[in-house]
Image (spheres, helix red, strand yellow):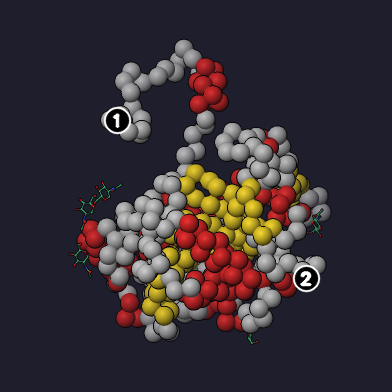
Amino acid sequence: MKLSSLIVPCLASLALAQTNATAHNSTVPHENSKTTIVVTNDDSWASANIRAFYDALKKEGYNVFMFAPAVQQSGTGGTFNLPTNATLAKGAEWQTAPAGAPSWAHDEKDDHIWYFDGTPGAAVSFGFDYALPKFYPNTTVDLVVSGPNEGWNLGPFVYTLSGTEGAMYTSILRGVPAVAFSGNNDHTYYANASNSETSAHKIYAKASTAIVKNLLENAKGRPSVLPIGVGISVNLPNVGDIDPTGKCVDPKPIFTRQTGRGAATYKLIFNETSGVFDEDENLKTDALRACFNGDCFLPDETDVVTKWGCYSSISVITADYDAPGGVAAEVQYLNRNLVTFAPTGYGSFPGRK
Ligand SMILES: *[C@@H]1O[C@H](CO)[C@@H](O)[C@H](O)[C@H]1NC(C)=O
Ligand SMILES: *[C@@H]1O[C@H](CO)[C@@H](O)[C@H](O)[C@H]1NC(C)=O
Ligand SMILES: *[C@@H]1O[C@H](CO)[C@@H](O)[C@H](O)[C@H]1NC(C)=O
Ligand SMILES: *[C@@H]1O[C@H](CO)[C@@H](O)[C@H](O)[C@H]1NC(C)=O
Ligand SMILES: *[C@@H]1O[C@H](CO)[C@@H](O)[C@H](O)[C@H]1NC(C)=O
Ligand SMILES: *[C@@H]1O[C@H](CO)[C@@H](O)[C@H](O)[C@H]1NC(C)=O
């Protein structure tokens, strides 16, 4: 890889951020102008899923960039870790860049494909704050897509852990619409991945691209693809070569919610033989069935994706973690006498300063 020419001191980003390249304030392009999509993930820039997704989106004619972690970053959630050195100590995933290569650089054959030695949320921010303003000035990002993750991200517990979801919620907190995609295939180096059209990474790329294309078409002319502060978490079922029935090649997307009967969290189990703990990832609680927001009659994504067959789950999420008014009021009442309301109106709704 010819990467050395791309080392640039971090300080340069301070001046370059002034171009506001990614401030999202333009209408979603119509067919005749190009939509810009940023692709990221947590399994690294060299995984089969992200490369297949990037290729499929490019084939549709979108202006696509990849800003993804140099190495596997599964389970990093929304953490924001930056490179601690300008060069890689250990090399990128599968030695796609050697030790000593820059900590951020683009593919030698494609200057829209970048790795960054940080967590997913940091990698996508590297695109917004450094690479795009510096190398592609005045680029407006219409949509961030994250994944497809190697492994499902089902239910609210895993949602918070997942780096793929983390890059999605980092983006929506920046005001950039974002969709996370997760599948169930293994960690695979793209250069070694199967070329079969029934391999999971190919089907995932096709299914994810169809969801993106439909969303962008429906959003034409809107000021933003999604309402501000809102994102989507998609989970794709077992398909093609990882589907035991071998029948699922074109999963049908349906609307779902994160909580519900299937949602689970983790607990510890002490293993007397090994003397350490094992993890049980299937703890069901009433809290995981609670429905405070959204449509309580939607099926939950965990059941849909793991039990219903050839269906993809589409759960709509927001960056507003506050409890709804009624629930908050009950909790505020439990804090009465000591905790009071602010004497003057604050808040973020229009008209209040
Ligand atoms: C970028 O945004 C800042 C803050 O909103 C503004 O002061 C500045 O003029 C903008 N710069 C450009 C080049 O538009
Ligand atoms: C978007 O741009 C328009 C016109 O330049 C401006 O009036 C409006 O305040 C901007 N909105 C945001 C959210 O920056
Ligand atoms: C950065 O990497 C270089 C080359 O591997 C090494 O010599 C140097 O000690 C590293 N610096 C820090 C602060 O780790
Ligand atoms: C970017 O936009 C600014 C302000 O609209 C303009 O002055 C500048 O020429 C543009 N740069 C490029 C490379 O298009
Ligand atoms: C890729 O395939 C080659 C040739 O079969 C093999 O030597 C190599 O270990 C594989 N690499 C990975 C990361 O799977
Ligand atoms: C407990 O640990 C042993 C030794 O590592 C392992 O073989 C066994 O499968 C573990 N038991 C359970 C129930 O996971």
Residue occupied by mark 1:
351
Answer left or right for 210 relative to 236. Answer: left
Q: Residue at x 38, y 50 (%)?
A: 175
Looking at the rendered structure, the kind of residue marked 2 is Gly
Which secondary structure lies at badge 2? loop
Tell me the quarter of the picture where residue 298 sits.
top right
Say whether disc 1 or disc 2 marks the residue closer to the N-terminus. Answer: 2
Answer left or right for 32 relative to 42. Answer: left
Q: Residues within 10 Å of mark 2 (few under 14, many from 20)?
A: few
Q: Who is closer to the viewer here, 318 or 270?
A: 318
Looking at the rendered structure, the kind of residue marked 1 is Gly
Image height of 349 relative to 275, above or below: above
Indicate the position of residue 94 as horizontal and vertical percent values: 55, 77
Q: Do tag 1 and tag 2 residues touch (Cβ < 8 Å)?
A: no
What separation in Å lies between label 1 and label 2 (alpha carbons)?
Answer: 56 Å
Image height of 2 relative to 274, above or below: below
Residue occupied by mark 2:
246
Indicate the position of residue 33 as horizontal and vertical percent values: 35, 68
Q: Which residue is drawn at 80% across and 67% down?
A: 245
Indicate the position of residue 163 as horizontal and vertical percent values: 53, 57
Image height of 266 relative to 234, above or below: above
